[in-house]
Amino acid sequence: MRGKLLIIQKNLKFTISIWIKKEVPMVGYKTKDGGVYRRGGIEDYIPQSQYGEEHREKVVKDILRNWVRLSRDGKFHALLATNSIIEAIEYYRLLKDNPLDLKVTALFDKNLDYTGETIFKQDGLVEIIEDYNDMFDQYFPYQNKHNLKRILL
């Protein structure tokens, strides 16, 4: 038989098993005839509840544990893409005070998504801008947050 058995385990209580022929795409796809989304990627079978605080802490631990090797002893930088502004802020807060003294910031689209948890997002962005200003002796007020994006890019 050709194929592989892939087991994705959230924790000891939750396991998803999928029979795979050849390769499994990361995500599903939209059909050519109108763009109806079809499940089929491995990410379609993993519940969003998996990506909570415990998951983020493990990701951060893995980043810090492997940083020196993966960055070639600090010669390269890294980017962590998240699914939402809230998730980016939560990762930022986990990474900003790190034992490797990595310089960490976050970057958002200039059109801040004001749906849900607006105060959390604004407070997080103010915190990130203030931390950046302190870290690099700069002055980017919250009102000019788009200028920070230009500097970072």
Image: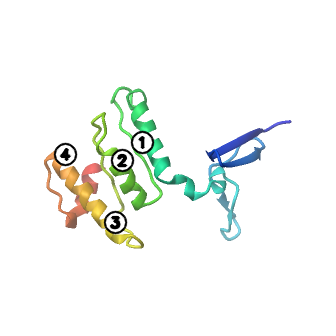
Left or right side of 144 for 104: right
Mark 1–mark 2 distance (CA, rounded to whole Å): 7 Å
- Asked whether, in this view, residue 109 is left or right of residue 27, the answer is left
Residue 97 position in % (x across, y down): 28, 43
- Whether the residues at callouts 1 and 4 have beta carbons within 8 Å, the answer is no
Residue occupying the point 69% across, 46% down: 24
Residue at the front extreme, as displayed: 13
Q: Which of 79 and 67 lies nearest the eye of the viewer?
A: 67
- Comparing labels 2 and 4, the label whose residue is closer to the camera: 2
Image coordinates of residue 126 in percent, x first then y, are: 24, 61
Instruction: Please report contact status of discs 1 and 2: CB closer than 8 Å, yes or no.
Output: yes
**Callout 4 secondary element:** helix
Badges 1 and 3: C-beta atoms under 8 Å apart? no
Q: Mark 3 points at which residue?
A: 120
**Disc marking residue 94:** 2
Residue at point 30% right, 66% down? 122
Dot 3 or dot 2: first in sequence order is 2
Q: What residue type is labelled 3?
A: Phe
The location of residue 56, given as percent across then percent down, is: 46, 48
Rendering quarter of residue 49: bottom right
> For numbered disc 2, what is the local secondary structure?
helix
Q: Could you give the CA–CA distance between mark 1 and mark 3, rounded to whole angstroms? A: 21 Å
User: What's the residue type where badge 4 is placed?
Assistant: Met
Residue shown at the point (65%, 49%) measured from the top left: 13
Which numbered disc, 1 or 2, marks the residue that appears first in the sequence? 1
**Most distant residue in the right direction:** 1
Q: Distance between the residues labelled 3 and 2?
A: 15 Å
The residue to which callout 4 is attached is 135
Amino acid at circle 1: Val
Q: In this view, does 28 lie to the left or right of 124?
A: right
Q: Do the residues labelled 3 and 2 touch (CB within 8 Å)?
A: no
- The residue type indicated by label 2 comes to Leu
